[in-house]
Image (cartoon, grey):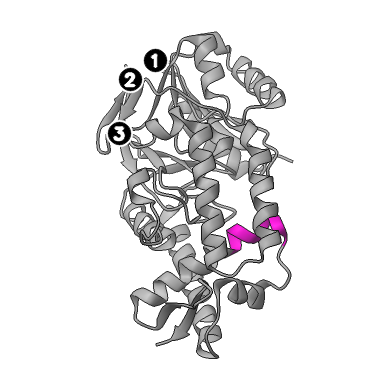
């Protein structure tokens, strides 16, 4: 049965010339929302993973609005995750559309395979440092390698500077960087209507995972570099978005959001609760991040191991910033967290 609230909000977006085209993915998050902007140039925001099924569904979604791939003039990418970028180069080759993304993301997209390999090596080093068993690390690397074909390299024609505008005949979108879920999260704000194209920065039905990711700038990811503080960064991004006057948020997954301030306040409260739970565990004695994760969630599925590690490290980073815990590395190279 159609959800009347969702249909109303999608109708508001459609009245502004923005149409949602949900595309299937092979991932637990389900369909990814691509958005067709009926303006000059005709623009698609995000494009789904590199799969024949996703392409077929996307083509049907465009056809429902009287369009086809060959009509596209611009493709805009919100961030680096494979369910958002996978079809970009295929669509650009078929249509001649220009590809636009955050300027810092363009080199990563151009050398996708090498960057993904470096990202996986970074993740493996992080898992080793925080006590994950070797068999879990090896299994996750294998899973990640098998997923890699859902993405593909992309040539960005138009790198976008933070604060710049993406201009159309009938609107302008302000380019804003909101890192945390990934280093490259970019949102696009139509200041005239208050509509925000948000990618995975904010999702109504699930909390966006602030994954500890290798920085886009390889020079910032070498051995001995500080661990990226993904959750600290993400909370800063959320607070920036909460301060905006928005009428509608169009997310990368799920339904539109009409009360972003309340949603963000709830997310921040949730992270505070998780932080307090982890602080209570560390108060009982020194623990690795993996030990904290198993105390919270028990046996963790291999596919969820890096997600839960990022979750624990994010909240420990908040406790470190508050001076409530300390971090030390044992002779075996494993990091443990202790009460301050």
Which circle's residue, 2 or 3, is located before the other in the chain? 2
Residue topped by disc 3: 192
Q: Is residue 87 above or below residue 211?
A: above
The structure residue drawn at horizontal position 40% and vertical position 81%, both measured from the top left corner, is 326
Which circle's residue, 2 or 1, is located before the other in the chain? 1
Q: Is residue 160 above or below residue 118?
A: above
**Residue 42: x, y in percent?**
44, 16
Which circle's residue, 1 or 3, is located before the other in the chain? 1
> Distance of mark 1 from mark 3, alpha carbons?
18 Å
Secondary structure at numbered mark 2: loop
Instruction: Return the residue nearer the eye: 95 or 151.
Output: 151
* Foreground label between 2 and 3: 2
Q: Quadrant of residue 37?
A: top left
Q: Quadrant of residue 171?
A: top left
**Residue 275: x, y in percent?**
48, 75
* Quadrant including the N terminus: top right
Residue topped by disc 2: 168
* Foreground label between 1 and 3: 1
Residue 79: say if magenta.
no
View extreme (bottom): residue: 284
Q: Is residue 135 above or below residue 26?
A: below
Mark 2 surroundings within 10 Å by alpha-carbon count, few (fewer than 14), some (14 through 19), many (20 or more) = some
**Residue 215: x, y in percent?**
39, 48
Instruction: Return the residue nearer the eye: 238 or 281.
Output: 281
Q: Which residues are magenta?
A: 301-308
Main SS category, magenta section? helix
């Amino acid at each position: 049965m159609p959800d009347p609230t969702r249909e109303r909000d999608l109708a508001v977006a459609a009245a502004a010339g923005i149409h949602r085209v949900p595309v299937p993915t092979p991932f637990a998050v389900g369909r990814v929302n691509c958005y067709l902007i009926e303006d000059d140039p005709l623009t698609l925001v995000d494009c789904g993973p590199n799969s024949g099924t996703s392409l077929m569904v996307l083509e049907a979604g465009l056809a429902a609005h009287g369009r086809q791939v060959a009509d596209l003039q611009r493709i805009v990418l919100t961030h680096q995750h494979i369910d958002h970028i996978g079809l970009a180069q295929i669509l650009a080759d078929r249509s001649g559309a220009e590809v636009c993304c955050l300027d810092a993301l363009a080199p990563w997209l151009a050398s996708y395979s090498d960057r993904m390999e470096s990202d996986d090596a970074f993740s493996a080093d992080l898992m080793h440092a925080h006590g994950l068993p070797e068999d879990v690390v090896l299994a996750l690397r294998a899973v990640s390698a098998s997923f890699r074909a859902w993405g593909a390299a992309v040539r960005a024609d138009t790198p976008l500077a933070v604060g710049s505008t993406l201009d159309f005949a009938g609107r302008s979108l302000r380019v804003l960087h909101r890192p945390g879920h990934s280093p490259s999260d970019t949102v696009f704000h139509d200041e005239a209507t208050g509509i925000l194209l948000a990618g995975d920065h904010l999702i109504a039905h699930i909390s966006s995972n602030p994954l500890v990711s290798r920085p886009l700038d390889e020079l910032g990811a070498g051995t001995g570099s500080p661990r990226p503080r993904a959750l600290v960064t993400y909370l800063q991004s959320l607070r920036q978005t909460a301060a905006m006057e928005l009428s509608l948020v169009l997310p990368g997954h799920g339904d539109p959001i009409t009360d972003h301030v309340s949603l963000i306040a709830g997310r921040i409260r949730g992270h505070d609760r998780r932080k307090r739970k982890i602080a209570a565990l560390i108060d009982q004695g020194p623990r690795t991040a993996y030990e904290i994760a198993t105390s919270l969630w028990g046996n963790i599925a291999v596919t969820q191991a890096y997600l839960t590690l990022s979750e624990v490290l994010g909240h420990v980073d908040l406790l470190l910033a508050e001076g409530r815990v300390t971090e030390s590395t044992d002779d075996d190279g494993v990091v443990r967290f202790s009460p301050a």
